[in-house]
Amino acid sequence: MAAQKLPNELLGRIIGLMEPTSTALTARSVCQRWNILAVPHAFRKIILRPTEKGYKTWGALLENEQIKDAVREVLIYSHITDDDKGFWDELPAGFTTALQKICDLHYVEKITVNFSPVCSGPESIQNDMISHETYPKRINVFEAVFNAIQARSYQPGRTSIRSFAVENMQNAPIPTFTSSSLFKSVTQDLEELDLHIVQEHNESREEWDIREAELVTFEPWLQDSWLMPMANLRSLSLCIDDFWGTAPGTFNGRGLAFPNLKSLKLKYFNISHYNHFDWVLSQTTLESLRLDSCTIATVLRLNEGLDLWNPEMHDWEPIPEGTFGSDWGELFFFPGTWEFIFEKIRTSLPNLVDFKFFPGPRYIEELDAVQTDINPTQQTTVLYGSRYSAFCEGDGWQDPTDFGGDMDFSDLEPSEQAMLDRHKPAEEGDQKALDELLGAIQRRQNQ
């Protein structure tokens, strides 16, 4: 059948399946009929870029009533390129004016804010070491976006924005913002939250990164001030670009309750106590759980950190001085295993019908302990080698299977190897528990 003879419903669906989206844009030029059918697909997602050209394009799009009806998602860039030097803190008038036009979008469902992946912490700014996108600028962007969302909520006939995402959110608390009525009024309607979090990186003195003040303060603030008020969430995704949850900051999840949560994804979350995963297990409505590059902490080597960071130390066992050939700092061992976690997931989350446990690219590219044929984009569940981790106060988190590395673990006795390298000794139990979990999920899917 010729395309021109297809009914509008079928032709419109075919155009909607075109990839990439630019193909649907091209389809508009075929004829008037194709133009009408392609608009809902070509402009489902629109982008605001902070340039004069970006403001002009944005304004032209929102003069079209059909496009305004088609938009379901808005992506807002706060920077021009990923290495944009964001020395300005006050937002340009054009950016603020453009954001206000969000009020004109009738059916938008999702807002995504994309910051630069490079950032400067508050202490760097105080010490006149400003580079990249600054802490005050990021706060101003958040406030401007939330003001636009709030203003839109006052317009009659507008849908509520249910989904909010942040790409490259800085790991620096912004307590004045999260305690404001603006933050509370916008987040009370959210059902989906996706946070990808980055941290300041000192290229000339990498060893200083672990002592950035926000590493201690951010995770408790994220838990208590950002997440805890969002009781209506149905989907939550949390990714911090380094192992998180244990040290230097602590994310214990206590008090987090999402009665309607169906989907949860955690990336680089580091488990270090027997009850550390209880906040996840208490979300009994979960139907989908994805653990991306998550680990269990095995060894902590601390010097000043015990007093400086005050980490939670229950379930940690002291290791005699000199173990692993090191006499620097205090050593602690956590005997927890993934076998324990998999078993708890199987018995505590009765509605779970989708579970993924997979390594990220950093493991596949760098570590010999991982199967080289794994494709991280497929998110295939596998008992990856680097599912346990170790922490050295001087060097941060690392894979303990890499003996002879920065932690000076060398010439180990067999008993010490078993203590440090949890991968092989725990493999049989971990695999059995993982298989039982996947089997239980398969039976639920077949019910």
Image (tube, helix red, strand yellow):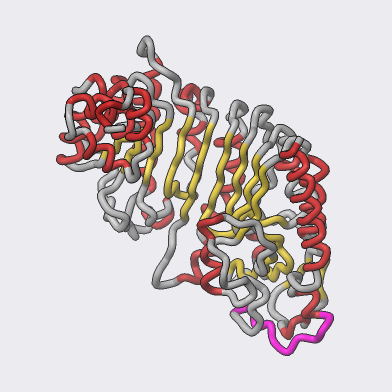
Q: Is 200 colored magenta in this rendering?
A: no
Residue in view at x 39 percent, y 57 percent: 124
Using residue 93 as the reference point, say whether residue 395 is left or right of it: right
Q: Quadrant of the C terminus?
A: top right
Residue 92 lies, in percent from the top left, at 22, 37
Q: Nearer the viewer, residue 244 or 293?
A: 293
Q: Using the image as rendered, state which of residue 212 and residue 36 is in the foreground.
A: 36
- Residue 219, x across and y down, in percent: 59, 47
Horizontal and vertical percent position of residue 101: 27, 24
Q: Quadrant of the N terminus?
A: top left
Q: Which residues are magenta?
A: 406-415
Q: Position of residue 216 (x, y in %)?
A: 58, 53
Query: Is residue 412 one of those drawn in magenta?
Result: yes
Write the residue at 28% across / 30% down: 38
Instruction: Write the residue at 34% across / 19% down.
Output: 106
For residue 22, above or below residue 144: below
- Horizontal side of 101 relative to 121 (left or right) equals left
Residue 316 lies, with reference to residue 110, above or below; the image says below
Q: Is residue 369 visible?
A: yes
**Of residues 261 and 146, which is closer to you in this image?**
261
Q: Name the residue rendered at 66%, 65% in the picture.
A: 384
Q: Main secondary structure of the magenta part?
A: loop
Q: Taking the image as drawn, is residue 316 in sight?
A: no
Quarter location, residue 104: top left
The residue closer to the viewer here, 200 or 411, is 411
State the image quarter where residue 64 is shown.
top left
